[in-house]
């Protein structure tokens, strides 16, 4: 399997695939792209079958496009599984391409194992039933159970309406276009700039405005001033309390660390939030600057209305660590579909680190010099006493991420290499001992022969 995977990667030049290598029209037609999430928080890999026609001359480029998207996602999201959606609306016999379907199936079964969670097939025409019977023959029992044949009435069992286009019964207004390459819609979270006091004042104003609109009370000004006073007096204490609480909660979790070229980021992959019942609404992100220069960073999210990030646009001094508090706002609850993007870039020593300097810096910094890392949300559903022990134990056990497995594999390979070297040394000594023994026996035999010859 390993040998076959290497041969496949060499044949399709997977490691060198990029937008500039593939024909531009492949991206423009929008037959394959990543967009949205299913109800379990897995990324959706869309295959718009109506845009695909069988053409032997284009087959290799189309297969390379599949490999490009899978490799692009594997490097970006660290092996998080995918849900494949075959949108077969408005398709017919001319769109049947069993060779291409088999290639996609082989990609998931042989070259990207454990990437596939399910295959959602939407409105498959009856005329294609015979073709899919052949496809089932290529799949094992486990893979067959992943096939979900759906229509407009039941597709929302797997994908919520917010990520379904109107023709599938959803409300997603997304329309594919290229360039640029399709990505998550990351936006700046609320309360991002200025000192923490001003952020809390702004948040307090929003809460007061909402309250006065609902109740219709006339003492708006008094309440606003009172809120401001309370916010300013308590901000330093509440901020320290927030950090202490979040750190103590995160201490229970075995955090992994993403080791980037500019920053080390903890946790490496997931932020743990509670549901409305559990009430855990804050998480801590720790950034460590490993460079010799100041590193500017920004935090963006796909759900800016839900989260408050302090700070979300700042800088980190060389060799220091900085804490970022991510908290849910109001009555919102975290979702598996929510994502965070951390962007970082090195600043010149002469550059300032104030808000105006940072704003100008992000306008001018080249995209190629920006480090990006994504974090996803994990929701802890239950808060029953019987499950608390299990939950705590679960947090104390490190999650076996790809990074952890890679480190363990590297460690095992190093141990194996050392053992192999020791065995080679032992074999060398053994061979040397045998040679010396044979030499000794030969010398002894020769001496006996000379002694015998002299006596004769």
Image (cartoon, grey):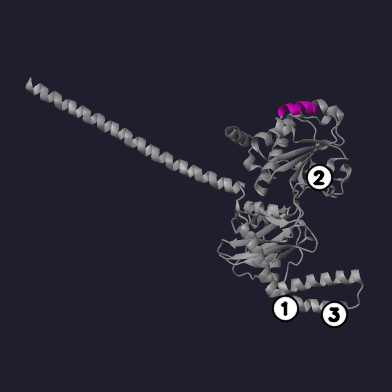
Tell me, for residue 16, which label it has, or none. Answer: none
Instruction: Give whichever of discs 2 and 1 has the lower sequence position.
Output: 2
Question: Mark 2 against mark 1, which lies toward the viewer?
Answer: 1
Main secondary-structure element of the magenta-colored stretch: helix
Q: Residue 272 at what x, y percent from top left? A: 69, 56
Whether residue 54 is visible, yes or no, is: yes
Residue at figure coordinates x 28%, y 31% from the top left: 435
How far across and how far down the image is residue 313, in percent?
Answer: 69, 65
Residue for point 65% across, 53% down? 389
Q: Are marks 3 and 2 in contact (CB under 8 Å)?
A: no
In percent of the image, x 36 and y 37: which residue is there? 426
Residues drawn in magenta: 131-138
Q: Is residue 383 left or right of residue 437?
A: right
The answer to which of 420 and 248 lies nearer the viewer is 248
Disc 2 target residue: 159
User: Is residue 136 in the magenta section?
Assistant: yes
* 397 or 364, nearer to the observer: 397
Q: Which comes sooner in the sequence, label 1 or label 3?
A: 3
How far apart, in angstroms, are the residues tagged by discs 3 and 2?
47 Å
On residue 222, which mark appears? 3
Residue 295 or 216: which is nearer the viewer?
216
The percent coordinates of residue 446 (x first, y second) are 17, 26
Regarding residue 376, the answer to whether it shows in the image is: no
Residue hosting label 1: 233
Outermost front residue: 386
What SS does tag 2 mark? loop
Above or below residue 129? Residue 353 is below
Residue 202, quarter of the rendered image: bottom right
User: Quadrant of residue 102 in the image?
Assistant: top right
């Amino acid at each position: 399997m390993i040998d076959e995977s290497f041969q496949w990667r060499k044949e399709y030049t997977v490691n060198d695939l990029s937008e500039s290598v593939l024909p531009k029209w492949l991206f423009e037609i929008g037959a394959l792209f990543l967009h949205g999430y299913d109800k379990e928080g897995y990324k959706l890999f869309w295959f718009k079958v109506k845009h695909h026609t069988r053409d032997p001359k284009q087959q290799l480029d189309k297969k390379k496009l599949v490999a490009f998207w899978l490799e692009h996602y594997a490097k970006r999201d660290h092996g998080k599984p995918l849900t494949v959606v075959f949108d077969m609306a408005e398709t017919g016999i001319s769109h049947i391409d069993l060779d291409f379907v088999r290639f996609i199936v082989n990609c998931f079964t042989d070259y990207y194992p454990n990437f596939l969670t399910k295959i959602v097939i939407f409105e498959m025409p009856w005329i294609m039933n015979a073709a899919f019977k052949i496809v089932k023959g290529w799949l094992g029992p486990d893979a067959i159970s992943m096939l979900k044949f759906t229509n407009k009435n039941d597709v929302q069992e797997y994908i919520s309406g917010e990520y379904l286009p109107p023709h599938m019964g959803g409300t997603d207004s997304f329309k594919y276009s290229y360039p640029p390459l399709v990505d998550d819609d990351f936006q700046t979270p609320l309360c991002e700039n200025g000192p923490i006091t001003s952020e809390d004042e702004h948040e307090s104003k929003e809460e007061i405005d909402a309250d006065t609109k609902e109740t219709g009370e006339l003492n708006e000004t008094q309440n606003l001033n009172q809120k401001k006073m309370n916010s300013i007096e308590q901000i330093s204490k509440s901020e320290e309390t927030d950090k202490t609480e979040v750190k103590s909660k995160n201490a229970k979790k075995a955090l992994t660390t993403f080791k980037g070229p500019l920053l080390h980021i903890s946790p490496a992959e997931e932020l743990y939030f509670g549901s409305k019942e559990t009430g855990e609404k804050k998480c801590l992100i720790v950034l460590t600057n490993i460079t010799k220069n100041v590193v500017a960073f920004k935090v963006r999210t796909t759900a800016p209305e839900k989260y408050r990030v302090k700070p979300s646009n700042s800088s980190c001094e060389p060799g220091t660590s900085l804490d970022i508090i991510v908290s849910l706002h109001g009555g919102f609850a975290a979702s598996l579909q929510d994502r965070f993007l951390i962007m970082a870039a090195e600043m010149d020593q002469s550059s300032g680190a104030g808000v105006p300097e940072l704003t100008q810096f992000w306008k001018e910094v080249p995209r190629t010099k920006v480090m990006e890392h994504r974090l996803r949300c994990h929701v802890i559903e239950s808060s029953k006493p019987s499950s608390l022990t299990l939950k705590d134990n679960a947090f104390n056990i490190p999650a076996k991420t790809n990074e952890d497995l890679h480190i363990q594999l590297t460690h095992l390979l190093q141990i194996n290499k050392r053992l192999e070297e020791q065995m080679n040394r032992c074999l060398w000594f053994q061979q040397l001992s045998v040679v010396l023994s044979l030499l000794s026996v030969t010398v002894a035999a020769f001496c006996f022969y000379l002694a015998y010859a002299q006596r004769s």
